[in-house]
Image: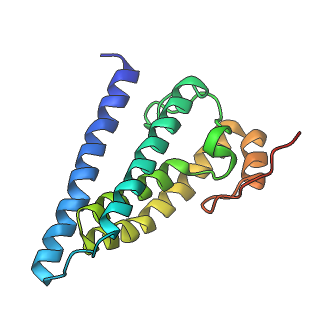
Amino acid sequence: MTSRTLAYFEMAVLFVLLYLGVPWVGLQIDRLLRILPWPSPIPWLGLGLAIVGVVGLAGCFVLFARVGRGTPNPTRPPEVLVTVGPYRWTRNPIALFHAAALTGLSLFLGSVSGVALVVLLSVPVHFGMLREERTLEARFGDAYRAYQASVPRWIPRWRKRQS
């Protein structure tokens, strides 16, 4: 198995655990605390959000492979700094698309606690991103510092197209 294949396999295992684990734990907490599911049409809006998240993740992974010549797995990171696509608007679109997909899935399944878990998980994710930024700065130097200065960490900033 090549290192790239192994990196994608490891990511797939992580995704299965994350996308089964968060909703399952959320539903168990809801059941234990007798929290009622979200009222209609919120689950259907959640399905839309989950689809946006999954499509966005797929797009980011394609960019990491094609533009960055690597994977989203830190054991086989991109060789080239990716600053196109959603990376033009935010430095962490993968984390944002994961949050959208997990929140959407939790909404679709009716789990109030699942949504709360996604919010709680955002705290360690934020600190992980701070560490990752130091790694990216060490790897890409001035190119990353310029990118960091022009693109926000979390909240997307939509730029007008330049003619």
Quadrant where the C terminus lies? top right
Colouring method of the image: rainbow
Would you say 133 lies left or right of 1 here? Answer: right
Q: Residue furthest front?
A: 41
Left or right of 66 in this view: 52: left
Quadrant position of residue 118: bottom left
Name the residue: 47% across, 51% down. 97
Q: Residue at x 64, y 53 (%)?
A: 90
Q: Residue at the far right: name it.
A: 163
Give whichever of 12, 111 is nearer the camera. Answer: 111
**Residue 110 locus on image (x, y percent):** 24, 68
In front here: 65 or 86?
A: 86
State which quarter of the image contains the N terminus.
top left
Residue 162 quadrant: top right
**Which residue is situated farthest in the top direction here?**
1
x and y, in percent, of residue 84 in the image: 67, 37
The relative height of residue 27 versus residue 98 in the rendered view (above or below) is: below
Residue at 27% in and 76% down: 39
- Count of numbered circles in the view: 0
Q: Is residue 64 left or right of residue 139?
A: left
Q: Position of residue 75 (x, y in %)?
A: 43, 34
How far across and how far down the image is residue 159, in percent? 77, 52
